[in-house]
């Protein structure tokens, strides 16, 4: 018997069930189909300004920095200012995201390059798929628009997120993922990012900048 | 067989740990840090207790339908272009992984933290076959340099102090300036970051564990704070996920429930910095990511736990809260347990996976104070399960003759209440009379194990039962 078949037959023998039991199959199919929500923390069940304020508060408590701009046109200047304020080089790596591409980068002196990160970029900008106010989490999806390597290799990661894409809870973002990728479908990678990289492995003292970005800066676009 | 165990020598291990000053200093970080942080995180979320119930119910439901969710998961992974391999035991898992690495022409393999990879001893197997495994989680990297096992499931190097890490870095990172300053922990972190960045970029294969597998979408999930797991899986051409059968959950909604209790129970964070959902290999629309995606699903004794008293242990999501709150773990640390999983969860799981004949000491290394159960995010009744092991150990005559005869003697009296009351009255009366002047004993016959470390308080002369009778009479009168 193959390893696979033996494991399945052991599981079924231990549980005292048969794989052909249609009632069990129906229960499983139904749960996978309906994907019922469980306990929903009241904290995330807020909307409008209250939700944005919660997102900001939670992101900042995870040690990200957050700034808000009124429109996409203001993003390049805001990022240039952030880099200048932290004495960081005026260079920026990004993918092919059309929302980022449409922004007026030429109004700044930033040196923009495109593509995945090879490990030497100091600064990168990505556009988030969404955000979750409950924990101040950014939701990134993989693709040429926003390569996953930009989320992890640069020292300073800047993420642009539209205020309208910030949900109260994770479940609302999964609904949007299902709408975009089909039920049961997923992009290759979904990254939830909550604050910059850190480690507590030396004497249980939390230190920032373990293997991923030392800084995480969020630009919320409120149009 | 799985990796070597020193669990049979638990008592010797524990005695050595108690006398190890470096270890005792390091362990004070566990007592101080984790407990407060978890409590604060739990207090901040009014629904935390309800979420623990929800997490327990999701895991129970999944385990009762594990065959079907595994099938659903497998077909989803295949549909997304990934490969699923099943391994009955450690040896099969090692061979599958070695085969994938060889097909990839791998010379170096980066690794995210995975307790299952410790369980199957994959590092030694790869090394023996000419492939260099590089642990990338900072704690795992440190213990790999020291050729040690993790002493904690989420903080593998918790048994070490910064000065010890400094010595190891100086010993191994010979290419760096010998006069460099490493006196601050942040300098150690920065050095490890630079050294490992090279390894990440050079690796041919990345191996990660999985905190969860989602049947609905064929997705594997890792949770990290460092981002090392992500660099392990997006940079090399091949990504291998190593997971055991009980990591399954039905849907993205279900895993969101579990994620709400995982980090809070583990480190007291609301969420870890990185939660990553991976589904299959690189797509045509991707600019980066692995070309090959393999999942190795390990049983290694778990399917036999289903339908037994120990099925509840398969709910475990490996947060480490039980050991963070365990007075025995606080005293002896993780290595004393002698295998991969320490603390209360290890005391229950280890006998299931390597046999109660080898690991019988572990379920006995508990005061049954119940703190582990009170903080477990999936409400595993750990003390009850440890008691089940003690019963089995007794039934199978695995306890030493002296313990067995003492338990039998006690059982003889306990089953005869009148005799029990009489005997205890005599004993307590005698001890109370003899010890009444000093109030304590420095030495007692047959109690050397106790009096070697502390005095035995003298009883007041009356048994609890006698006093109970007396006071109840007084109250009803």
Image: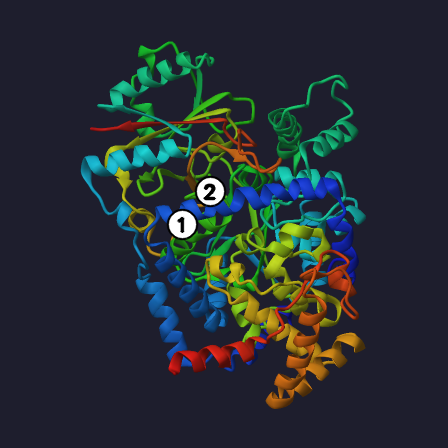
Q: Along the line of sight, which residue is nearer the eye, A217 or A206?
A: A206
Respond whether the residues carrying marks 1 and 2 are from the same subunit: yes
Q: Along the line of sight, which residue is nearer the eye, B314 or A201?
A: A201
With respect to residue B87, does B226 lie above or below?
A: above
User: Dot 1, crowdedness within 10 Å: few (<14), some or many (≥20)?
Assistant: many
**Marks 1 and 2 close (CB-CB < 8 Å):** no
> Residue B196 lies in what quarter of the image?
top right
Provide the chain ID for the residue under circle 2: B
Provide the chain ID for the residue under circle 1: B
Q: CA distance from mark 1 to mark 2?
A: 15 Å
Display coloring: rainbow
Can the viewer see residue B259 in this picture?
A: yes
List the residue tagged with mark 2.
B272
Q: Which of the labelled discs sits on residue B170, or is there none?
A: none
Q: Is residue A174 left or right of residue B189?
A: left
With respect to residue A133, does A186 lie above or below?
A: below
Q: Quadrant of the C terminus of chain A?
A: top left
x, y percent for residue B432: 67, 70
Please tell me which of labels 1 and 2 falls first in the chain.
Answer: 1
Q: For the residues carrying marks 1 and 2, which lies nearer the camera in this image?
A: 1
> Residue A137 lies in what quarter of the image?
top left
List the residue tagged with mark 1.
B42
Q: Find numbered disc 2 in the image and state the secondary structure of the residue it sits on.
A: loop
Q: Find numbered disc 1 in the image and state the secondary structure of the residue it sits on.
A: helix
x, y percent for residue A95: 42, 28
With respect to residue B299, does A179 lie above or below?
A: above
């Amino acid at each position: 018997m193959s390893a696979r078949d033996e494991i399945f037959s052991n599981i079924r023998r231990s549980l005292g069930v048969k794989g052909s039991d249609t009632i069990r199959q129906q229960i499983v199919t139904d749960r996978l189909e309906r994907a019922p929500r469980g306990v929903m923390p009241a904290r995330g069940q807020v909307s409008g300004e209250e939700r944005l304020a919660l997102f900001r508060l939670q992101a900042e408590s995870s040690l990200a920095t957050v700034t808000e701009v009124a429109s996409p046109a203001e993003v390049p200047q805001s990022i240039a200012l952030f880099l200048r304020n932290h004495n960081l080089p005026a260079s920026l790596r990004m993918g092919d995201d059309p929302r980022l591409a449409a922004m007026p980068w030429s109004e700044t002196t930033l040196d923009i390059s495109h593509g995945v990160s090879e490990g030497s970029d100091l600064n990168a900008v990505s556009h988030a798929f969404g955000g979750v106010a409950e924990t101040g989490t950014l939701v990134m999806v993989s693709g040429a628009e926003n390569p996953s390597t930009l989320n992890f290799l640069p020292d300073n990661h800047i993420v642009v997120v539209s205020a309208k894409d910030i949900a109260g809870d994770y479940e609302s973002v999964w609904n949007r993922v299902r709408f975009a990728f089909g039920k049961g479908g997923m992009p290759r990678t979904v990254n939830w990012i909550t604050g910059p990289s850190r480690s507590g492995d030396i004497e249980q003292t939390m230190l920032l900048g373990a293997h991923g970005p030392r800084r995480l800066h969020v630009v919320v676009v409120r149009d | 067989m799985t990796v070597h165990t020193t669990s049979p020598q638990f008592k010797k291990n524990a005695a050595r740990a108690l006398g190890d000053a470096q270890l005792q200093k390091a362990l004070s970080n566990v007592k101080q840090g984790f407990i407060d942080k978890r409590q604060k995180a739990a207090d901040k979320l009014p629904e935390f207790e309800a979420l623990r119930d929800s997490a327990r119910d999701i895991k129970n439901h999944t385990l009762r339908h594990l065959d079907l969710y595994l099938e659903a998961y497998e077909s989803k992974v295949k549909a997304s272009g990934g490969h699923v391999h099943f391994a009955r035991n450690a040896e099969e898992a090692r061979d599958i992984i070695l085969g994938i690495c060889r097909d990839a022409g791998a010379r170096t393999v980066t690794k995210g933290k995975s307790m299952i990879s410790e369980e199957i001893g994959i590092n030694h197997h790869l090394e023996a076959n000419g492939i260099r495994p590089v642990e990338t989680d900072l704690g795992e990297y440190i213990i790999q340099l020291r050729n040690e096992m993790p002493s904690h499931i989420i903080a593998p190097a918790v048994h070490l102090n910064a000065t010890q890490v400094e010595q190891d870095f100086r010993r191994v990172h010979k290419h760096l300036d010998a006069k460099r300053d490493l006196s601050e922990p942040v300098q150690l972190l920065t050095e490890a970051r630079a050294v490992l960045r090279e390894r990440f970029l050079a690796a041919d294969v990345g191996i990660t564990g999985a905190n969860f597998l989602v049947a609905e979408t064929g997705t594997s999930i890792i949770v990290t704070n460092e981002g090392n797991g992500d660099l392990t899986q997006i940079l090399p051409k091949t990504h291998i996920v190593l997971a055991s059968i009980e990591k399954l959950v039905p849907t993205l909604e279900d895993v969101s429930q579990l994620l709400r209790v995982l980090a809070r129970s583990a480190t007291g964070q609301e969420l870890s910095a990185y939660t990553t959902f991976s589904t299959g290999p690189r797509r045509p629309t991707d600019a980066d990511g692995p070309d090959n995606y393999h999942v190795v699903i390990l049983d290694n004794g778990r399917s036999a736990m289903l339908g037994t008293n120990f099925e509840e242990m398969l709910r475990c999501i490996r947060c480490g809260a039980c050991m963070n709150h365990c007075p025995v773990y606080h005293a002896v640390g993780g290595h004393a347990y002698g295998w991969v999983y320490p603390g209360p969860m290890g005391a229950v799981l280890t006998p299931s996976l390597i046999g109660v004949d080898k690991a019988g000491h572990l379920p006995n290394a508990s005061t049954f104070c119940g703190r582990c159960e009170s903080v477990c995010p999936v409400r595993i009744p750990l003390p009850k399960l440890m008691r089940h092991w003690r019963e089995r150990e007794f039934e199978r005559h695995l306890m030493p003759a002296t313990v067995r005869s003492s338990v039998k003697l006690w059982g003889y009296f306990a089953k005869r209440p009148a005799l029990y009351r009489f005997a205890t009255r005599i004993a307590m009366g005698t001890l109370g009379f003899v010890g009444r002047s000093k109030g304590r004993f420095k030495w007692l016959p047959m109690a050397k194990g106790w009096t070697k470390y502390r005095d035995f308080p003298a009883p007041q002369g009356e048994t609890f039962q006698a006093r109970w009778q007396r006071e109840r009479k007084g109250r009803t009168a």
